[in-house]
Each structure stands twice: as C-alpha cells, then as structure tokens.
Amino acid sequence: MNRIFNTFLIKTIGCYINVLSYIFPKMATKLAYKFFSEPRAGKLKPEFMPEILEKATIETVSLKNYNFPIYKWDGNETKILLIHGWESNASRWEPMFPYLQKSGCTILAIDGPAHGLSSGDEFNVPYYAEFINTVFQKYEPQILIGHSIGGSACLYFQHHFSSISLEKMILLGAPSDLEILLNNYAQLLGLNTKVVQLLNTYFFERFNIKTDEFLGEKLASSLVIEGIISHDIDDDVVLFLESKKIASGWKKATFIETKGLGHSMHDKTLYEDIEKYLFTS
C-alpha cells in the first residue's frame, strides 16, 4: 500500500512540475532541480555517530556556503581519501576499513554536500569535487576511492583539478553519463521533454556543463594514473555498462567484474584484491 501511495505521490509531483513548465518555467526548473539534487537520507546527528566515525579525528572545514567534516584515522605517510555515494555518508566504508588499515596508512573520509554532518540540502558533483579538492590541497592523498556517484565526483575532480599527488584511483559501481541520470529521474517523475530541456539549460548556465557531454568515458580519457574500476553485474541502481563506458576511456585501469554484490559492492574478496593492488603492486 505504501509503495502504491509513494508512486502516486511521485507522479503527482511530476505532473505538477509539467504544468508549471508552461506557466512558470523558472519555478518548474527550481522545483525539478530541488527534487533531483536533495538527498532524503544519509544525514548524521553529532549525538548519534556511527562507531567507526567516533574513532576518527574530525575537522570541520568551511567552503563557500558549506561546512563539511574531514574524518582522519592517523597512520603512516600514505594517505587514502574515501568518497561515499548518494544518500550515504563516510560510515559506509566501515566494511573496507580492516583491509585498508593492514598497510598502516592514514585514512581520510568526508561527507558529501547535504550528507552526513555536512551542511546544506543540495548535492551535485561539481560541489563534491570541490570538497575533494579542498582535502587534496590540505593533505595531498596518494589514493582516491569512490563509490557510486562519489566515483563520478572523483573522476570529475581529477579531470578538472589534476592533482599531482594522486597516484591511484578506485571506482566502485560508478555511473558514467549525467544525461542517463537525468533521463532516469525524468522517467521516474513522468516529466515532459520541456522540463528536461529546462534542466539541461540550468546545468549549463549554473555549472557550465552540457549534460550530453558529461560522460565518464570523456572524463576518464584525461587520466594518466593507474587504477581499478569495479562493478557488479547484478547492480540494480547503476547499470553495469556504465562502468564499462568509463573503462573504455581510462586506458590504465584494471576492470574487476563481480556478481551478487548489488550496488553496495561490499565483499571480502573484492577488498582483498584492492588491498593487494594498492599495497603490494
């Protein structure tokens, strides 16, 4: 019953935005973008922190209109930065921690815009990439690991900022094309082509991004570092072929195909393979 109600509510919102697009296009654009960019889960409260994050040193950083935390687990001079995905937070990396900590490295993590302890209610890849760049300017990590849309933010970051400290990057279940994300969103709400075009215009005017040119393959083609791309063939959130697109542009990446992990990609064997790649190769 709840599922039927939620579907009805979503379609009703989409219908309302469609009507607005012909009468008040600016209002329709604002509302459509709000529902696209505002996460409904993943926030944390300081008084109810996951145990793994309580063990970290937490530094709050200000960037433009945002405040966001940098979590730090001290170790040696090798530094890894972890970037979570949509409607998540830095605690999602807890299953991977034992494999990364074997090397004694220093681990860093952040909460993305409007996630975890970060302020705001808007999430987008350009802002997330600026968060990542802020950490790189301060700590100069050598390794970057991103999950889901966090992986896209990692690609966007290195494509635009070209950090000289970055040596290896790991992408797990990352989407490739912004246009696909927008089309899936439009299909979910039942948005008409006028609203989609309004969103395309909005992305270009605000972020200087042409949605049909925001392609993982294109971003990855500028990478000169080595890394791993891994995706599960049973992923029902981001299509397996999305990572294949990224791999076609990133010539120095090793592709690891998994099965049965879903979108989370949490898996002992996969993490052992990543540990071996990062610290013994």
Image (tube, helix red, strand yellow):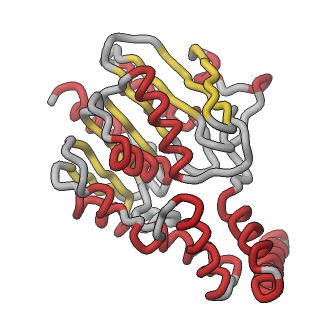
The reply to whether residue 242 is visible in this rendering is yes
Name the quadrant containing residue 269. top left
Task: Point out the image quarter for the C terminus.
Answer: top left
Question: Measured along the vertical axis of the image, is residue 223 above or below residue 103?
Answer: below
Nearer the observer, 275 or 85: 85
Instruction: Give the residue displayed 51% in from the left and 50% down from the top.
Output: 126
The reply to whether residue 11 is visible in this rendering is no
Instruction: Give the residue displayed 71% in from the left and 72% down from the top.
Output: 29
Nearer the observer, 105 or 208: 208
Where's residue 27, x and y in %? 80, 72
Question: Measured along the vertical axis of the image, is residue 26 above or below residue 215?
Answer: below
Where's residue 128, x and y in %? 53, 44
Instruction: Give the residue displayed 28% in from the left and 28% down from the top.
Output: 165
Question: Measured along the vertical axis of the image, is residue 140 above or below residue 210?
Answer: above
- In the rendered view, does 175 fall on the left or right side of 206? left
- In the rendered view, does 131 fall on the left or right side of 115? left
Instruction: Give the residue displayed 77% in from the left and 88% down from the top.
Output: 22
Nearer the observer, 70 or 233: 70
Nearer the observer, 38 or 22: 22
Number of disc labels? 0
Task: Point out the image quarter for the N terminus.
Answer: bottom right
Where's residue 255, x and y in %? 24, 54
- In the rendered view, does 268 fall on the left or right side of 63? left
